[in-house]
Image (spheres, rainbow, N blue to C red):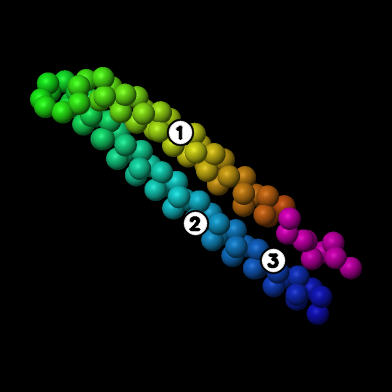
Amino acid sequence: MLTAKILSMMEDNKQLALRIDGAVQSASQEVTNLRAELTATNRRLAELSGGGGPGPGPGAAASASAAADSAAANMENHQHSAQGFNRLGPARIRSDIVDPVQVE
């Protein structure tokens, strides 16, 4: 009876690990998409700052470009953190699973 319950708990833990892994992968993909969008925005700001048309001067565009670069670096740091969790999270979950052979 106890062994069946432990096996059920192990299966539940495996399913949870898979769901967590999927969520982390989705979040990582979203970060990648946002970084691409931010890069495109940064490129567009750089183009506009050289245009000399009406509106804020090059200083404002350069400031916005620097802010976009800073945000991109911040997103990259978060992505590396998510990737680290993606590697370590399920491993830790697996290490917390009880081995039914050891249970008496």
**In this image, 44 relative to 80: left or right?**
left
Q: Of discs 3 and 1, which sits in the foreground?
A: 1
Answer whether labels 2 and 1 touch (C-beta < 8 Å).
Answer: no
Question: Tag 1, which secondary structure?
Answer: helix
Extent of the magenta region? 96-104
Q: Is residue 54 magenta?
A: no
Task: Identify residue for label 3.
Answer: 10
Tell me which corner region of the image, top left, top right, bottom left or bottom right, holds residue 14. Answer: bottom right
Q: CA–CA distance between discs 2 and 1?
A: 23 Å
- Quadrant (top left/top right/bottom left/bottom right) for the N terminus: bottom right
Q: Is residue 8 left or right of residue 59?
A: right
Left or right placement of residue 13 versus residue 33 in this view: right
Question: Which residue does the image show at 69% across and 72% down from the upper left?
Answer: 8
- Residue at the spot 72% in from the left edge and 52% down from the top edge: 95
Q: Position of residue 48 (x, y in %)?
A: 17, 27
Q: Amino acid at mark 1?
A: Asn
Q: Which residue is mark 1?
A: 74
Can you give x and y, in whole percent of width and height, for residue 84 in the image? 57, 40
Disc 1 crowd rating (10 Å Cα; few below 14, some 14-19, many 20+) is: few
Q: Residue at x 62, y 52 (%)?
A: 90
Under mark 3, the amino acid is Met
Mark 2 highlights which residue? 22
Q: Is residue 65 left or right of residue 31?
A: left
Q: Position of residue 68 (x, y in %)?
A: 34, 31
* Disc 3 to disc 2, C-alpha distance: 18 Å
Q: Could you say which quadrant of the image residue 70 lies in?
A: top left
Q: Residues within 10 Å of mark 3 (few under 14, many from 20)?
A: some
Q: Is residue 53 above or below residue 9?
A: above
User: Disc 2 marks which amino acid?
Assistant: Gly
The first of marks 3 and 1 along the sequence is 3
